[in-house]
Structures are given as C-alpha cells and as structure tokens.
C-alpha cells in the first residue's frame, strides 16, 4: 500500500511523515509537487511545513499548484487524503475541506502539546479510537485558528464532520484548553466524504516509540481502512 507524501517548497514535515508511515508498514513515496501525482497511489498525505513561506495566507499558494487538481480527482475517486498542519491549511485553501486556518488568537507561533477529544470515531482517521477519547498530540503553528461562518459550522456539527476538538486533559472543551482560538475548538474536520480530512495537530510526531508518545498512530492507520 503506497502513500504519496506531497512536497512543496517549504514543506518540512515530509520526511517525518514518511518515517511514521513506514513504521506502520506503509510504503511512503515523497512526491515533488511539480512532478505530478504518480499513478496507483493508495493514499495521499499533505504534510506540514511553511509552503511558500506562508505568504498571502498559510497554504494559499500551494493550493494553486496543479498537483492539487490531481489530488482532488483522486479524492473524488475514493483515494484517502490526510492534510496535517500546513497540509491542513492547503486542504482548506484548496476547498478539499471547509473553512480556513488563520492567525492564532495569540498572534504568535505556538509549539506545545495539546489534548484533543475524538468527536466522531466513525471515520477512517478516528476508527481506532472511541468517541470521547482524549489524546495528546503536538501542535506547532502560527496560523492554526479554525474559522468558518456560523451557519456552515452548524452544518458541520450536525453532519458529524468535526473529528477532533481541543480539550483539557479530562476531555472538557473549554476556552482555556483551546490553544489558538479555533471556532468551536475545531482541530480536525472532514471533507464532504470522510476519507478526506485535515487536522492542525501532528499525528506523525506522536507515532514512533522513540518520540515518547504514540497517540497519533491510529490517525495514520486510517490510510489502511
Ligand atoms: N507545523 C507546520 O505545519 C507549520 C505551520 C504553519 N505553516 C503555520 O505556522 O501556521
């Protein structure tokens, strides 16, 4: 099973993602965006980083790379797509997923561990958790605040498309536990179909025993489901 990890100028979590995926038994191929999507990939990961220096708005320029049309076509054909951090920003900027990620409420880059509550355990990315599980993953972003209109967010909530929310260690969603001011504490959301999803925290940074935490492994295992 081969997962394409797409590299843009400024991606910096591409190799970590490959290593995490390989540790789970996947074949992971780094794909430079100008080379186009290889035929017969079984999954696509948009990794974190600072594509195009986060100019305009994080992810906005990478979203215009022609490979994103191919990613969309593959997603429409059922190929699983996961965007993490800058990959989440690219996913939203290219409308694979709804909303946008913009400047943190703190107006600062934040690098810390956060807790997330699993909101919907019935997606490929959350199937190995139980609804309500609390997991701990790292974040590292300056533009991680999820923003969307109230009306669209209500629809996402009603359709169970929010997969993770920021919470405290006990699973309470509170303003204090929301690291960046994301609306409704959204940390991860699916596309129209749940085999497409994006999230700001980094599961690949918590997927190897050597990293001291493996809470993120189940997310990446979603590529196999
Ligand atoms: N870890 C990442 O993917 C980098 C974050 C991102 N481009 C930001 O600062 O918002």
Image (tube, grey):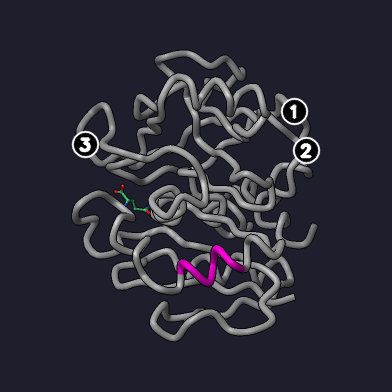
Give me the residue at 38% from left, 31% from top.
147
Residue that carries the numbered disc 2 in the rendered image: 122
Quadrant position of residue 41: bottom right
Q: Which quadrant holds the N terminus?
A: bottom right
Residue that carries the numbered disc 3 in the rendered image: 108
Decide if ligand 1 comes within 8 Å of the CB at mark 2: no
Give me the residue at 74% from left, 49% from top.
124
Question: Is mark 1 in CB contact (under 8 Å) with mark 2?
Answer: yes
Q: Is residue 42 magenta?
A: no
* Closer to the eye: label 1 or 2: 2
Q: Residues within 10 Å of mark 2 (few under 14, many from 20)?
A: some
Quadrant position of residue 86: bottom left
Please, is residue 35 above or below residue 177 in the view?
Answer: below
Circle 1 SS class: loop
Decide if ligand 1 comes within 8 Å of the CB at mark 1: no
Q: What segment is highlighted magenta in the picture?
A: 68-73
């Amino acid at each position: 099973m081969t997962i394409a990890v797409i590299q843009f100028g400024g991606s910096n979590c591409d190799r970590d993602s490959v290593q995490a995926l390989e540790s789970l038994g996947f074949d992971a191929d780094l794909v430079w965006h100008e080379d186009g999507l290889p035929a017969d990939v079984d999954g696509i990961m948009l990794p974190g980083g600072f594509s195009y220096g986060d100019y305009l708005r994080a992810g906005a320029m990478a979203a215009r790379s022609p490979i994103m049309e191919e990613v969309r076509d593959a997603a429409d054909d059922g190929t699983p797509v996961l965007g993490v951090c800058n990959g989440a920003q690219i996913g939203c900027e290219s409308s694979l997923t709804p909303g946008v990620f913009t400047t943190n409420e703190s107006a600062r880059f934040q690098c810390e561990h956060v807790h997330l509550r699993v909101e919907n355990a019935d997606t490929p990315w959350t199937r190995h958790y139980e609804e309500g599980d609390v997991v701990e993953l790292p974040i590292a972003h300056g533009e991680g605040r999820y923003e969307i209109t109230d009306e669209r967010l209500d629809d996402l909530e009603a359709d169970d498309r929010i997969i993770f929310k920021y919470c405290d260690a006990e699973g309470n969603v509170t303003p204090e536990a929301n690291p960046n001011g994301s609306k409704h504490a959204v940390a991860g959301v699916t596309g129209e179909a749940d085999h497409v999803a994006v999230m700001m925290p980094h599961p690949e940074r918590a997927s190897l025993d050597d990293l001291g935490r493996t809470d993120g492994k189940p997310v990446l295992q979603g590529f196999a489901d």
